[in-house]
Amino acid sequence: EHEGEPGFQDPVRLKEANRRFILKQYGLTPEDYDRMLAEQGGRCAICQTGSPGRGKPSFSVDHDHTTGRVRGLLCHNCNVAIGIFKDNPALMVSAAVYLTFGPPEVPDADGLVARSTLPDLDRRQAIARKWTLKQHGLTPGDYSQMLAQQCGRCAICKTKTPGGPRGGRSFAVDHNHETGQVRGLLCRNCNVAIGLLQDDPDLLVVAAIYVTPSRLLEG
């Protein structure tokens, strides 16, 4: 359909109408959005990027899911990451500690390995895991050792469920993208979230402070 033809809808007008509709869900006007963005220096409230990301024309309106209070404007990555962490500042700090110091040491790791049992994998899953481990210079035995040292849990959120597509049964092998050094085993959510926040512990702390209610920070 072209301009002037029956049924034609101006894409610019559609985009603006969609923007107004989204803002209205948060009790905001376009003027409120512009004011908030100006107060944030035209940048994401967490990572300070000037780009909304993912080809989006506007920053995401972030809000407290408990109270409904609007907190600020975030880029796509930061908005998704804090959502994965369930707006939980303790989890974000835990992730920052993990990135800085690695998973905590567990005494009697050898005994834990001996007593641990890995989930049964079908042939395709076993081949996929072996191939993934090989990319990081690990064997299935190394994976078992690491998982036992983490008490069978994600090194950040402590879930026992790896998550992932098709009910993944293996934790993700997390590594330093600059050095290649393996850091630990993470559930899919935590692995994705720290990647969205650039594997940067400082950004995770900023995110933790951002989602913490001001009344707690002031107290």
Image: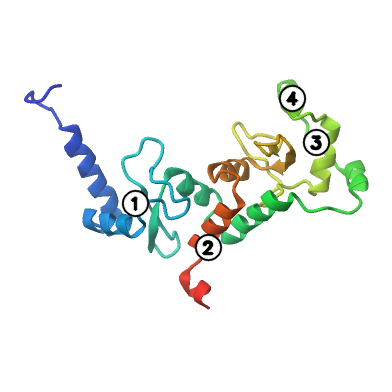
Q: Residues within 10 Å of mark 1 (few under 14, many from 20)?
A: some
Mark 4 or mark 1: which comes first in sequence? Answer: 1
Q: Which residue is mark 1?
A: 42
Q: Secondary structure at mark 4?
A: loop
Q: Residue at x 89, y 48 (%)?
A: 109
Could you give the CA–CA distance between mark 4 and mark 3, rounded to whole angstroms?
17 Å
- Image coords of residue 117 (percent x, y): 84, 39
| Labels 2, 1: front one | 1
Could you give the CA–CA distance between mark 4 and mark 1, rounded to whole angstroms?
50 Å
Q: Identify the amino acid type marked 4.
A: Asp
Could you give the CA–CA distance between mark 2 and mark 3, rounded to whole angstroms?
34 Å
- Image coords of residue 200 (percent x, y): 59, 48
Mark 2 or mark 3: which comes first in sequence? Answer: 3
Q: Identify the amino acid type marked 1.
A: Gly
Q: Is residue 107 above or below residue 13?
A: below
Quadrant where the N terminus sits is top left
Q: Which residue is mark 3?
A: 143
Q: Residue at x 38, y 58 (%)?
A: 72
Q: Identify the amino acid type marked 2.
A: Ile
Q: Identify the amino acid type marked 3.
A: Tyr
How many marks are shown on the rendered structure?
Answer: 4
Q: Which residue is mark 4?
A: 122
Mark 3 or mark 1: which comes first in sequence? Answer: 1
Q: Which residue is mark 2?
A: 209
